[in-house]
Amino acid sequence: MSAPKILMQRGLDHPGTSHKLETYEATGGYRAVRKALDMDPLAVQQEVKTSGLRGRGGAGFPAGMKWGFTPRDSEKPKYVVCNSDESEPGTFKDRWLLENDPHTVIEGIMIAAIAIDCHLAFNYVRGEYSYQGMCFQAAVDEAYANGYLGKGIFGSDYDLDLVVHYGAGAYIAGEETGLLESLEGRKAMPRNKPPFPAVEGLFWCPTVINNTETLAAVPWIIENGGDAYAQYGTEKSKGTKMWSCSGPINKPGVYEVEFGVEMMGFVEEYCGGLIDGIGLKGIVPGGSSVPVMRPEQCQGARMDYEGLLERGSLVGSGGFIVIGDNVSAVDCLLNLARFYAHESCGQCTPCREGCGWIEQLVGEIRNGSGRQANLTKVLELADAMAGKTICALADAMAWPAVAFIKNYPEDFAELCEGDVDLDALEEAVSRHDHIL
Amino acid sequence: MSSTGNAVTTAISLSAEATRRIDEIVARYPTPHAAMLPVLWIVQREQGWISPEAMEWIGDRLDCSAASVEAVVGFYTMFDAAPVGKYKLQVCRTLSCELMGARKLIDHLRERLGVEPGDTTDDGMFTLQEVECLGSCGTGPMLQCNFRYHENLSLERIEALLDELRCAEPTDEVTPVIHDRPSRDAYREMFPTSGR
Ligand SMILES: Cc1cc2nc3c(=O)[nH]c(=O)nc-3n(C[C@H](O)[C@H](O)[C@H](O)COP(=O)(O)O)c2cc1C
Ligand code: SF4
Ligand code: FES
């Protein structure tokens, strides 16, 4: 299962020095941006469209198409924002990039800027990433010192500034419009869409927001061509993906593989299998927001956008959480419900009330005072939340709620007070699992 | 842009370096208000927390009300509107860490420090907090102590860390401390056992 390493090659080949400008340039860095400066911006966009690169922050939207939505002849300034808020539980790949290859991220930001005619870009780094922000800032300083950022970058007449902006602890600041609010100095309350950021974003100006990993793939694409990138992966999932692997496995960590690898093979070969004595209960493949998969759903699953959808889950941000049979599904769902209840920004009633209510209902089951009615209520709430709010945080609560109950009804039944009619529970699940 | 031109009504004692950096940062953003988070960071780093006087001062500096500064401070978990201990221990409690033993780690800390999450020890040394995923899910359980991550923790390593912190002074060090993975026995002590 060997894979091309587009994003992680430099870091793996040059441990300890891969973050330095010297190493970056010695291994071909900052060639793509020079090339982009000589290209028609629309041709840069076209190359990214050809590559098939989709957003790696969670939603999987085609990157080149997003760039194309920004108006060409805008009176207003345009902005590029890199989303390094990385707070989706189970995800730590952007951290790897900021620590080990910050110049690739910078170069990706530069190329995106050139493609939409932007002269001020931001990287929004989550506040807890002090070390990673420092690594990234050091790289930005190196780039400024060499004339790669600032006035007339790389000796051209193109000006570009890049500001590193720290968050301060809020999952919802990772949602793109919450991020914009945060960057403007307010609470990270997501905005109603439309208007989309590409038309009215930061300071109500056209803005491209992309995840760190998305932007990090761009230099390779411009250097080698969109067609070359599109040769990797599968029919509709092009290129490679960084998976952040956690849980009771022997080799947790970040692994980059071509889209389309088989899931259980990946668990064995990359994750080193499960820790001795622990059996596989399930896998949450794309970060805490996506539906959990049972072992039989994992077996033979293709790790790409369509393959996971076929098996009832999603690529999401690629937070690959392996769950062992030493833990109850009730504890897993309670943990996530507490997370989403804590992180809901509170401006939509279904989300604010629903997350807190689900936490309470599952908490009652956990402490033995919950009944079958608690489960029915959780399912109803999830149904009433999904797709009915300003942002997808409510869906991110609803999906795991339904998936955990659907996949592990026996765990919930075991802890409920009184008998649980499993047939009736299954029937209730079937009324609400259309949201998955 | 200098702060002298603004109607700064409340005096707070910021170093010259901090006010210089604030001026520089405000100038970098298209609106002064956008400098809110970075300015709060500078003030909190220097004063340890965001006092009501600091909120007044920041409001004046960024052309907004102290109330809107307060709202922002309250929204983000990393800003402290009250003084905290010399060491802020923020333990990740989210799923990947819970799977690797975070619950036992937190219980251990509660017992050893004699405080509940959210509280500070009587000697003002430690504030214990439970926080959500810190992006160290592959090296959990873990905690953040002030600005530094400590990863792959075990109950034993927590003891050693507390001892170490007790006889040192806080630093600005941010480089993560990433231990080797705990032994199988250490995991056996920590892993959840709620499964069937
Ligand atoms: C609740 C919520 C949290 C999110 N958190 C993040 C995040 O931490 N990092 C990220 O890149 N995208 C996050 N997203 C997705 C962003 O809204 C946005 O789709 C993404 O940054 C766009 O970049 P991409 O197209 O390159 O993926 C989040 C979305 C939601 C609904
Ligand atoms: S869905 Fe939840 S997090 Fe998103 S805007 Fe509404 S209340 Fe806020
Ligand atoms: S779940 Fe603890 S760091 Fe991610």
Image: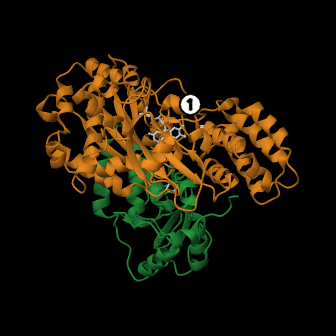
User: Which chain did the image draw in orange?
Assistant: A
- Crowding around mark 1 (Cα neighbors within 10 Å: few <14, some 14 to 19, many 20+) is some
Which is more toward the observer, B38 or A142? A142
A399 relative to A428 in the view: left or right: left
User: Which chain did the image draw in green?
Assistant: B
Residue A54: where, in percent of width, then height? 42, 29
Residue B67: where, in percent of width, then height? 54, 50
For label 1, the residue is: A309
Residue A50: where, in percent of width, then height? 33, 20
Which is more toward the observer, B102 or A411? A411
* SS assignment at label 1: helix
Residue furthest bottom in the image:
B167
Residue furthest top in the image:
A73
Mark 1 C-beta to ligand 1 under 8 Å: no
> Which quadrant, please, contains the C terminus of chain A?
top right
- Give, as a three-letter code, the residue at label 1: Leu
Colour scheme in the image? by chain
Which is more toward the observer, A246 or B53? A246
A250 relative to A154 in the view: left or right: right
Name the chain under label 1.
Answer: A
A48 relative to A87 in the view: left or right: left
> Which quadrant, please, contains the N terminus of chain A?
top left
